[in-house]
Amino acid sequence: MQETEILIAGGGIAGLSAAVRLAADGHQIVVVDPAPAASDDTPQASANEIEVKNGTTPPQDLRTTAFLKPGIDTLTYAGVWDDMQASGAQLRVMRIIDAGGTERTPRETADFDGAETKDGYFGWNITNIAAKAALLRKIATLDNVRLINECKVTGFAPPKAAGPGPAIVTLSDGQKFSASLVLAADGRNSTLRDLAGIRFNRWSYDQDALVFAVSHETPHDNISTEIHRSGGPLTLVPMPDHNGHPCSSVVWMVPHARAQQLAALDDAALARELQRDTMNLFGTLNIVTPRAVWPMVAQVAHRLTAPRLALIAETAHVVPPIGAQGLNMSLHDIETLAKQIDLAKLEGKDIGSDALLKGWERRQLPKTVGRVGGIDLLNRAAMAEPKFLRDLRYTGLCAINHIGPLRRLAIKAGIGK
C-alpha cells in the first residue's frame, strides 16, 4: 500500500492543472492517466477528453482553449502560465455579431473591449496540445507530483461511515494507494463518479462542432468573433500567425446533418463555405489544419462530492463551447477547492473531511448548475430557426450592447467572473 495526500484520476488539462495548483501549496500528489506518456512536446489528448462522433480518437486534439483571467491567475500561482502563454494569442476584444436577418449581413455587432476591464484583455487562446505540454514540463520539475501513465482507477473504497481514515484507490495495474482526498477528473464518462454512485443528467443537441484552424487575409487584431445566425454559433478565435499570415481557430456549431456535409468537403470547398458564413469579414480563408467533428452534449452531476472524493471538470459538468466557459469552469472548480484545502492544512485539519467537501459543494454546486443552464439557454437561442426567436435574440444583443448595466454584466461574464 502506497500513501499520498491527494490522488487525481485523469491526466487531461484539468487534472494536470489541479496537480500543479495543489503542488504549489506543498501537497503530495499522484496523477493517474490512461494515456501513454508523452514522448515529445506535442502530447496527444488524454483518453478522458476525447469523444468524437464515430467513437474513434483523432491523432491529436485539435481544439484550443481561451483561458480567461481567473483561470490565468490560477495557472500563474501554479508557476506554469508564462510557459503556456508563450504559444498563445491575446484576446483583446470579444465581438458578437447577430446575422439572423433575411440577408446574410450583420444586423448588430457588439464589441466588448478588454480596455473596459482592469486588466486590459479578456484572456489568451492556446492550443490544448501546447497547454498540456506546458503542464507536463512543469510537472517534470516537481518533486511532489508523481504521474502514472497507461493506468486508470478501477476501485475506490472510502472509509466506512465517512470516518477519519483515508480512501483506498486501486489502479488497473494492481497498485493501491491510500489518499486523504481523491479528485475525479477522469472525464464525462468517469469511472470514479460511477464507483461513488453519483448520478448525473446528460442531454444532447442535434448539433456538432467542426473544429480546425484557418489563415485569413484580414488581420484578427486580437478580436474573438462569434457569429449568430441559426443552427449554432460560429466562432473564430485569434491564434499566432501561420506562415506569416493571420490565423484563427474555428469552432463551427451546426446541425448534425450539415456537419456531416461540411466534414465531407475538401479544404477548398470548406473554406468557401466558411467564407460565406463569416460574411467575408476575414477575406479569403485557407484551412491550415485537419478538422475534427465533436458531438454537442451537456451534462451536470447531481452531487460534487462523496466521502474523500470531489468531482471537478468534465466529471462534474460538460457544456457546449460557448463563451469559453468549459475549461474555465474547471479551473474555477480547482481554485475554489484548492483554497479550502490549503486553509484546512494551515489549520491542521483533515483536507478530505466530509465537512470541508460538503461546504465546498454547497457553494459550488449552485454555481455549476446555473452556469450549465445558462450556457444551454444561450446555445438553444443560437440554434433558433424561427424568425421571431432570431429577432428576440437580436433584441437581446442590442440591449446588452447599449444598456450600461447589462453591458457591464456581459463584460464581467466575459472575463469569467
Image (cartoon, rainbow, N blue to C red):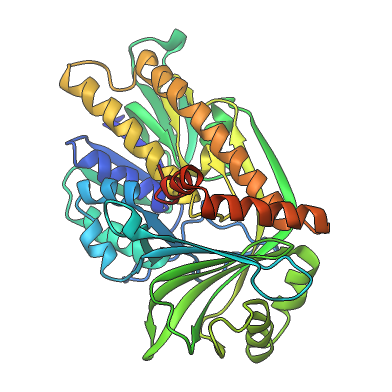
Q: Is residue 1 left or right of residue 342?
A: right
- Vertical order, 97 against 288 (above or below): above
Q: In the rendered image, is residue 186 in sight?
A: no
Please tell me which residue lies in front, 253 or 26.
253
Residue at the far front: name it. 403
Image coordinates for residue 179, horizontal then vertical, percent: 32, 27
Residue at (40% x, 42% y) in the render: 417
Residue at (57% x, 32% y) in the render: 369
Count of residue discs: 0
Please tell me which residue lies in front, 359 or 69.
69
- Vertical order, 267 against 330 (above or below): below
Image coordinates for residue 181, horizontal then vertical, percent: 35, 27
Q: In the rendered image, is residue 115 in sight?
A: yes
Please tell me which residue lies in front, 166 or 259.
259
Please tell me which residue lies in front, 131 or 224.
224
Q: Is residue 161 left or right of residue 356?
A: right
Image quadrant assignment for residue 191:
top right
Residue at (64% x, 80% y) in the render: 279
Q: Quadrant of the N terminus?
A: top left
Residue at the far right: name it. 386
Image quadrant assignment for residue 83:
bottom left
Q: Is residue 26 left or right of residue 259?
A: left
Image quadrant assignment for residue 145:
top left
Image coordinates for residue 409, horizontal then vertical, percent: 46, 43
Image coordinates for residue 177, horizontal then vertical, percent: 34, 32
